[in-house]
Structure formats: structure tokens, C-alpha cells
Amino acid sequence: MPKVNIQKKSTDTDMTPFVDIAFLILSFFIMATKIKAPEPVKTTPPNSVSSKTLPKDESVLITMDDKSQVYFTILSETDKTVAPKLIADINAKRNLNLSAKQQSNFARTNIIGTSFAQLGTLLNLPDDKRNSITQTGIPVSDSLNNELVWWIGSAKTAFADGKRRVKFLIKGDEKAKYPAFEAVIDALRRNEEMKYYLVTSLEQPPAGTDLYISRQKGTTKD
Amino acid sequence: MASLEGGGDSGGHKKGPGVKKAKKLSTRVDMTPMVDLGFLLITFFIFTATMSEPKAMNLNMPKEPEKPDEEMLTKKSGALTIMLGKDNHVYYYEGELDAQASNFKSTDFKGIREEIIKKKKEVISRYVRDIKCEEQAAKDKIDPKSCEQKDFFVVIKPNAEATYKNTVDILDEMAINEVSRYAMVKITPTENELIKATEGGQK
């Protein structure tokens, strides 16, 4: 009988292809991702079928959180002069008597969610504290004293210097109540702004509906 | 040949029992820690990734003098008024609200879609060809089909207890069903009363 020689095989596997794949995936993710920007106010936007991309620059972001509090942010990456102009304008129009230091602090404030009466106190805080503190929201519910109107008005003035049309983004939490939204719209309307962008996350139109059919045909434009 | 240690060997090949053979080191590197690290980084990037970019939905509001326009429009039979109440309840009526509020109905977000589709079909079926409108549509590069629903008008009235999600959902419903004419209007006290009464009745 011939002897069958079973060779003892090593249990070691060659890991090289494994490593190759791992690093391939890794490099893909590094290149494909944008790191999430830290949000000062957490919101979960509702879904919509709209697939338009969001304007990121030269715009004003109005945030409503789940407690229906309203916050104001200016998004102006390319032009850094907008924020100083805006605060100077607000300061003059509302007689806030903000010091130069407070005004320069404004440019480094991520989000404004306080009344004019408390704005000075907010701007006195050191940077890290100012951007992490919980704010109570801009007073909007009283239509006679809707402070957002002033913020929007000044934002328009600040952006208007360069003859730019500022875009208005409204980002609301799902749980925000309608009156807050109405107050925001009212503030915009009083500044003669009628066109807004609502921030939503994408959702596909349900099968069988008109939009679904026209998207299938490719006749819709959006 | 003389050697320094244990000179018993005649050749250079064989070594005595005390001498250890120099072990041939493998050139292979243990890859396990590298793989570990690789996958750790992958997981990190997956978690921090923003895969779905936020999207924008356009909303255009009418200019302030909207009242006469609205009243005129709701008089038409092609009008559908949708009211949003608390706990995702939806209320609606077609045309004008009659005195006994007998056409005031309650539904939810699933039901309202069917109602919109039904109403839209009904308006389209009544459509008499309007050449003027179609010509205008062609000029403005709009689908001439939008003329078919020119009498169809949806009025959206969220009340104080409706959420922002409800509002966006109903606006989205307009987009889903391709309703070309709709407006968001303040709710009237009568309608608010009716919603309150219906809510009370359900409990």
C-alpha cells in the first residue's frame, strides 16, 4: 500500500488581501465623507420628496427646535464682513449700546437665540461658553414685539451692500409647533421676503402618485 | 582549522550539540493589528459620515393682501380646505363650509391623500379646454396639463396645535400629488371651534 502523505498545513492565513480591502474601504470613506458639523441646537428635520440641494452660503438660517424656540444664524463663508455689518446695524437700530468687543464677539457666535435685552450678556461670555450655553430663543410669539423681524431686516441690509439676494432657510424640528413657524413666516413677510427654503431630508414619493409617475417618465423639473 | 570554540569539528558544517543553529527569521509580518486598526478607522468614518445631505423645499408665500383672493377662490367648487389639528389629525371640507358644517370631515394623513387625488380627478374631469390658458402655459414653458387643474385650489390652515412636521407633510402632499395651486392661510375662529368640537367628540 502506498503511503498517503498528508501534509500538515499551517493555520496561518495570508492577511494581505484582507488588509488591502480594508484600506481601500477606509480610503473611500475618508474621501467620501464630510465630517458632521457640530450643531449647537439639535433638530430633526421632517422628510419631504424635494430633492433640491440646500444653499449653504449667503443665506440666513432660522432654526426652530423641538420646544418651538427660534434661533438665528447667518451663513456667510466667503464674505466675513457680513457679521460685523449686521451687528453694527442691529446695534444702531435698536440702541443696544454694544461695545466694540461685544460686536467683534458676535462674528464668532454660532447661533443667536436670545432677546435683545440679553444679547449683551450673551456676547460678554467667552467663546466656548457662548457657543455651548442653552439659549431661550428669540422672542417671536408676540407679533408687536417680534424681534426676528429686526434680525432679518439687518441681515438684508448687511448682505445688500454687495447687491446680493440673501436666501432664507428655515430648519425646524418635527415637534416644533405651527405658531412658531407662523411667527417666523410673519417676520419674513414683514421684511417683504416671500420665498423660503425649508430644510428637509429626502424621502421617495410613494408609488402610484402623480409625482412618482412623472419622475418615472422624467418629465418633472426639480 | 582552528576554531575558537570546541575545536572537535573537522568541517564547518556540523556543529556540536552546544551550538544553536541561527534561526531563519520569517519575513512575514503579523498583519492582525493592522487589520484591527483599519477596521476601527472604517467604523469611525462610517459613523461620522453624513450620507444624506439635507435637502431644501421651496415655499412661496403670497403677498399680504390675500384675503379677497382666498374668499373668491373658496367660493368655487374646486376648492379644498385642509385644516391641521393636534395629534396628526386632518380635517377638510370641499368648496365652502356650509352653515351646519355638514361637509366638515375628519381624516388622517393617509386619508387626505386619497381625498386630494379624488378631488383633483373630479376637477380635471370637469375641465373644458381653455386654449388661452394652454397657450400661456406653452409660453411660460409649463406643462399645459397644469391648465386642467386650474380650478383646483387647496387652502391649508394649520391650527395652533399642529406641528411643523404636519405643515411640511401637507406641503409635501401638494408636491406628491402635483397640486399647482395652494396657499397657507390663517385658520378662522369658526373652523377652530369645529376642530375643538370634533376633538371633544372623539374622546
Image (tube, coloured by chain):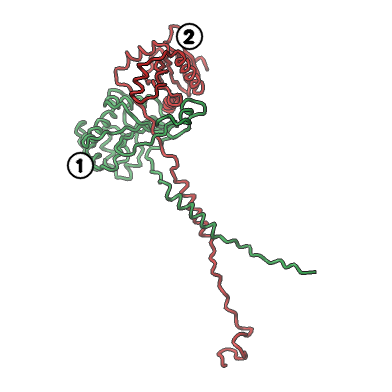
Chain colours: A green, B red
Figure quadrant of residue A82: top left
Q: Is residue A97 left or right of residue A36?
A: left
Q: Position of residue B83 (x, y in %)?
A: 43, 18
Q: In this view of the protein, which residue sits in the foreground, A93 or A46?
A: A46
Residue located beneath label 1 in the image: A100
Host chain of mark 1: A
Q: Position of residue A206 (x, y in %)?
A: 50, 29
Q: Position of residue A63 (x, y in %)?
A: 36, 33
Element on which disc 2 rests: loop
Q: Residues within 10 Å of mark 1 (few under 14, many from 20)?
A: few
Q: Residues within 10 Å of mark 2 (few under 14, many from 20)?
A: few
Host chain of mark 2: B
Q: Amino acid at mark 2?
A: Ser
> In 3D space, how far apart are the residues under numbered discs 2 and 1 (Cα atoms)?
63 Å
- In the image, residue A216 sits, relative to residue B73, either above or below, namely below
- Residue at the extreme bottom: B2
In percent of the image, x 42 and y 47: which residue is there?
A33
Residue located beneath label 2 in the image: B102
Same chain letter for marks 2 and 1: no
Element on which disc 1 rests: helix
Q: Amino acid at mark 1?
A: Ala
Q: Is residue B14 left or right of residue B61?
A: right
Question: Can residue B195 be seen in the rendering of this structure?
Answer: no
